[in-house]
C-alpha cells in the first residue's frame, strides 16, 4: 500500500490585541476547523489557482469580538509567507477572473456600478475644492483592484493613482497600478479604500500609514461589507462577509467610524449626489441618503484636519 504524500500545512499567527482599540479583552464568538462543514463546502466551491484546502487540513479559525469597542475580527490569520502564497498562487489571475465572472454582469448592474463611481467622483470634487483651488483632484485609490474607479476618475480630469498588492489584478488591469504604498510619492486631495480594510492584517496601522499622504482638509472614503449581526459561518452570506482567509476584519457602521477616528480622521456626513435624468431615481437616492442617518451604512466619508 502506498503512503499518502504529506502536504505542508499553512502557518498562522494570532492577533491577540484588538485591531481597532488594541484591547486584550476579547470574546470568542465562533470557531472551528477549515475542514468542518459548511465552511469546507463553501471553500471548495470557490475558484482557486492552487487549491488551498490541502494546506488547511489542520488549520482552525477563531472569530472574536472586542469587549471594549465591539470590533469583530478573525484572531488567526496566515503568516506573511503563506499570505504571499495566497496572493500569488491561490488567487491567480485566472482564478480571479473566474470569480469575477460569477458577478452580475448585466447591463443594468454595470450601469449602477458606473453611476456609483460617478457619484463618488462628484462628491470628492466638491469636498476638495477648498483644498486644491483650481487645480485638478489628486486621488489615490488604495486596493484599487482592476483600476475601474481610476479609469472613471481620469475621465473627469483627476490625477488618479492606484495601488494593489494582487498581481492577478494588476496584470489584468487597463491602467498602470503600483504594487505597494512605498512606490507612491506626494500628497493627495482624496484617498479611497473600497472593500479593502476587511482584507488587511493591520487595518488601523494602514490607515495611519496613509495619513501623511492625505493633504490637510483632504477626504478619505472607506467602504466595507456590512457585518452587522454576523457572528458565525453557517450560510453563504455569512461566509462571504466572514471569509476566514479573505474577510479577516468585520466592520459595522460604528466600528468603521471608530477605527478611522483612532487613526486620526474625522467623520463627515457625505453630501447627496444623484447622477440621473429620472425623477424616481432622484427621489430614491435622496431617501437613501436620509436613511443613512440611522447608523447602518459602511460606506463613509472622513476628513483630515
Image (cartoon, rainbow, N blue to C red):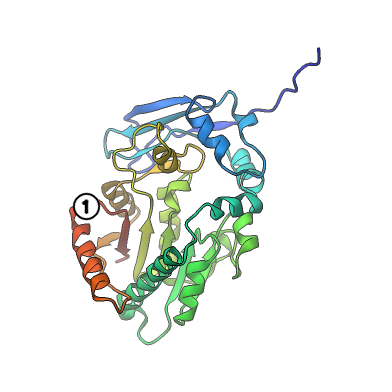
Residue at 35% x, 77% y is 125
Q: Is residue 26 left or right of residue 108?
A: left
**Residue at the spot 36% in from the left edge and 70% down from the top edge:** 120
Q: Where 101 sits versus 1, above or below? A: below
- Residue 253 versus residue 125 in the image, above or below: above
Q: Position of residue 54 (x, y in %)?
A: 65, 29
The x, y position of residue 124, in whole percent, is 35, 73
Outermost residue on the bottom side: it is: 134
Q: Is residue 156 visible?
A: yes
Quarter of the picture containing the N terminus is: top right
Residue at 55% from the left image edge and 58% from the top image edge: 164
**In this view, which residue lies farthest toward the right?**
1
Return the residue nearer the eye: 44 or 76. Answer: 44
Looking at the rendered structure, the secondary structure element under dot 1 is loop
In the rendered image, residue 77, in percent from the top left (x then y), is placed at 51, 36
Above/below status of 132 relative to 80 = below
Q: Nearer the viewer, residue 30 or 162?
A: 30
Q: Crowding at label 1, few (<14), some or many (≥20) Cα neighbours within 10 Å?
A: few
In the picture, residue 109 is in which quadrant?
Answer: bottom left
> x%, y% of residue 291?
19, 58
Nearer the observer, 32 or 112: 112
Left or right relative to 232: residue 100 = right
Q: Is residue 78 visible?
A: no
Q: Return the residue at label 1.
A: 295
Q: Which one is nearer the viewer's eye here, 274 or 211?
A: 274
Amino acid at each position: 500500500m502506498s503512503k499518502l504524500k504529506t502536504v505542508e500545512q499553512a502557518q498562522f499567527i494570532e492577533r491577540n490585541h484588538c485591531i481597532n482599540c488594541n484591547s486584550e479583552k476579547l470574546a470568542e464568538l465562533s470557531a472551528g476547523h477549515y475542514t468542518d462543514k459548511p465552511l469546507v463546502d463553501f471553500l471548495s466551491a470557490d475558484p482557486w489557482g492552487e487549491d488551498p484546502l490541502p494546506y488547511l487540513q489542520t488549520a482552525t479559525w477563531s472569530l472574536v469580538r472586542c469587549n471594549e469597542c465591539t470590533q469583530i475580527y478573525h484572531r488567526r490569520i496566515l503568516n506573511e509567507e503563506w499570505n504571499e502564497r495566497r496572493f500569488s498562487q491561490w488567487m491567480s489571475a485566472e482564478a480571479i477572473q473566474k470569480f469575477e465572472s460569477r458577478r452580475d454582469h448585466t447591463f443594468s448592474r454595470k450601469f449602477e456600478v458606473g453611476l456609483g463611481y460617478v457619484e463618488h467622483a462628484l462628491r470628492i470634487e466638491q469636498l476638495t475644492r477648498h483644498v486644491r483651488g483650481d487645480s485638478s483632484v489628486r486621488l489615490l485609490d488604495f486596493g484599487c483592484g482592476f483600476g475601474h474607479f481610476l479609469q472613471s476618475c481620469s475621465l473627469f480630469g483627476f490625477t488618479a493613482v492606484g495601488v494593489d498588492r494582487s498581481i492577478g489584478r494588476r496584470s489584468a488591469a487597463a491602467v498602470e497600478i503600483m504594487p505597494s504604498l512605498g512606490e507612491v510619492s506626494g500628497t493627495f486631495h482624496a484617498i479611497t479604500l473600497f472593500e479593502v480594510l476587511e482584507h488587511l492584517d493591520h487595518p488601523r496601522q494602514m490607515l495611519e500609514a496613509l495619513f501623511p499622504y492625505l493633504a490637510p482638509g483632504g477626504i478619505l472614503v472607506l467602504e466595507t461589507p456590512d457585518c452587522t449581526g454576523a457572528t458565525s459561518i453557517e450560510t453563504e452570506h455569512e461566509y462571504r462577509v466572514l471569509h476566514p482567509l479573505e474577510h479577516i476584519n468585520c466592520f459595522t457602521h460604528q466600528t468603521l467610524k471608530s477605527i478611522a477616528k483612532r487613526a486620526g480622521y474625522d467623520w463627515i456626513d457625505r453630501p447627496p449626489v444623484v447622477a440621473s435624468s429620472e425623477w424616481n431615481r432622484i427621489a430614491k437616492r435622496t431617501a437613501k441618503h436620509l436613511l443613512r442617518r440611522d447608523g447602518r451604512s459602511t460606506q463613509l466619508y472622513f476628513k483630515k484636519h
